Structure formats: structure tokens, C-alpha cells
Image (cartoon, grey):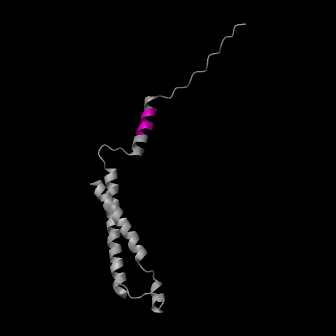
Amino acid sequence: MEKLVLVIHVLAAIGVIGLVLLQHGKGADMGASFGSGASGSLFGVSGSSNFMSRATAGFVVVFFTTSLALAYMASNKAGHVSVVKSHAAQVGGAEKAAPAVKPEAPAAEVVPK
């Protein structure tokens, strides 16, 4: 299930990137009105922005939904322990298991003369 959601997530990301790159900026209409650009497109002058913006919004919704689904699946894996929780358990367990003991002073060595 996680693999399927991941594939959909990657496809949605590629779709968002592609549609954003295909869209015209706000200043592109001004240049097209003076004849420097091709104002007629496959969807017409106003239809292009409407279709593209709606398709982009759809891909964005799918992208965010799959992002949340992947995050939920990653946090709720069976038998999976959080790195933070496991580290806290190790540190807390080590402190409880080994009491703080002062090291003894080293014994003076007797050197024969």
C-alpha cells in the first residue's frame, strides 16, 4: 500500500512541476497583447489559464493528501520505534542500570630500592 501511495505521490509532484512550468506568468499577457507572443493557444486565451490552474490545484491536493498519508504510514509502522524514543530509553536505562560510583583512587605503587 505504501509503495502505491509513493508512486502516486511522485507522479503528482511531477504533474505539479510540469503544470507550473507550462503556465504563463501575470506579465505574459501584457507582452502578448502587443504582438510579441502567441496569445492564441490550444485552450483559447482565457481557457488556458482556467484549465491549467484547475489541473494544478488538483495535483496539489493529491500531492498534499499523499504527503499526509505517507507521514501517517511511516509513523504507525508495526514494530517500529521512534529514534527519539529508543534513544531516550537507552539513556534512561543506562542511568538506572549503572549507579553513579566514584572511581577509587589508584593505589600507590611500592617500588623496591
Quadrant of res 86: top left
- What residue is shown at x 32% (from left), y 55% (from top)? 72
Tell how many labels: 0
Residue 90 shown in magenta: yes
Residue 100 in the image: state x and y as whole percent. Answer: 50, 29
Residue for point 35% across, 83% down: 48
User: From which residue to which does the magenta span run?
Assistant: 88-94
Instruction: Return the residue found at the far right.
Output: 113
Q: Position of residue 85 (x, y in %)?
A: 39, 43
In the displayed structure, 58 sits above or below 24; it is above
85 in magenta: no
Residue sitting at 70 percent across and 7 percent down? 112
Quarter of the rendering occupied by the N terminus: bottom left
**Foreground pick, 41 / 87:** 41
When asked about the image quadrant of residue 103, the answer is top right
Q: Residue furthest bottom?
A: 34
Q: Judge from the rendering whether residue 105 lies leftward or rightward of residue 92; answer left or right.
A: right
